Image (cartoon, rainbow, N blue to C red):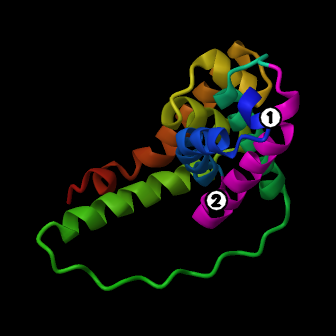
Amino acid sequence: MQRVGAGDAAACSVLVERHLPPIVAFAARMLADRAEAEDVAQETFLRLWRHAGAWRPRARLSTWLHRVAYNLCIDRLRRARPAPLDEAHDPPDPAPDAAAGLARQQTAAIIAAALAALPERQRAAIALVHYQELGGSEAAEVLGVGVRALESLLARGRRTLRAELAGRRAELLGEP
């Protein structure tokens, strides 16, 4: 971070290369929109570049980046957005495992929709712990809550997801 703060573009490139994929993935789970997630990630790294000179290592860099991305996601979620247009679907792929790939995509879409329906903080807690694989204290720091509050958010989110997905078990597992 000191090198980035001194204007070293190569050092910044290394940090972006290392941290961009998890930030984009986290933002995509929060926003359920890949393009919006990429915008959030870009803004996150612009802030990294701008604030690198004043960096004080109070937290891990990945924690700080997730916190910035989380705040940007919340800002975007709270802004009124027009409903997205339905995406045009590609014709089925005739390859032998196209059906399995389609089933995986449908399962992922069902889970993503259930995750997107959770309240913001529960969604963020689940995304940070289960998808970003942050530890409890780090995820709690990103959300600005204590570890016990994080555990409560996780428990409520998991319970809601379990209830939402329980009726779709056969569909999720590809059973008739």
- The disc at residue 121 is none
When asked about the image quadrant of residue 101, the answer is bottom left
Categorize mark 2 by other alpha carbons within 10 Å: few (<14), some (14-19), many (20+): some
Look at the image and give the residue range highlighted in magenta. 31-56
At 70% across and 14% down in the image, what residue appears? 148
Q: Quick one: quadrant of the C terminus?
A: bottom left
In depth, the one of 98 and 6 nearer the eye is 6
Q: Which residue is mark 1?
A: 5
Is residue 25 left or right of 66 when viewed as pictured?
A: left
Q: Residue 80: image x %, image y %?
A: 84, 66
Is residue 51 left or right of 4 when viewed as pictured?
A: right
At 17% across and 80% down in the image, what residue appears? 94
Q: Residue 118: image x %, image y %?
A: 64, 46
In depth, the one of 22 and 26 nearer the eye is 22
Q: Amino acid at mark 2?
A: Glu
Q: Is residue 2 above or below residue 105?
A: above
Q: Residue 161: image x %, image y %?
A: 52, 41
Q: Which residue is mark 2?
A: 38
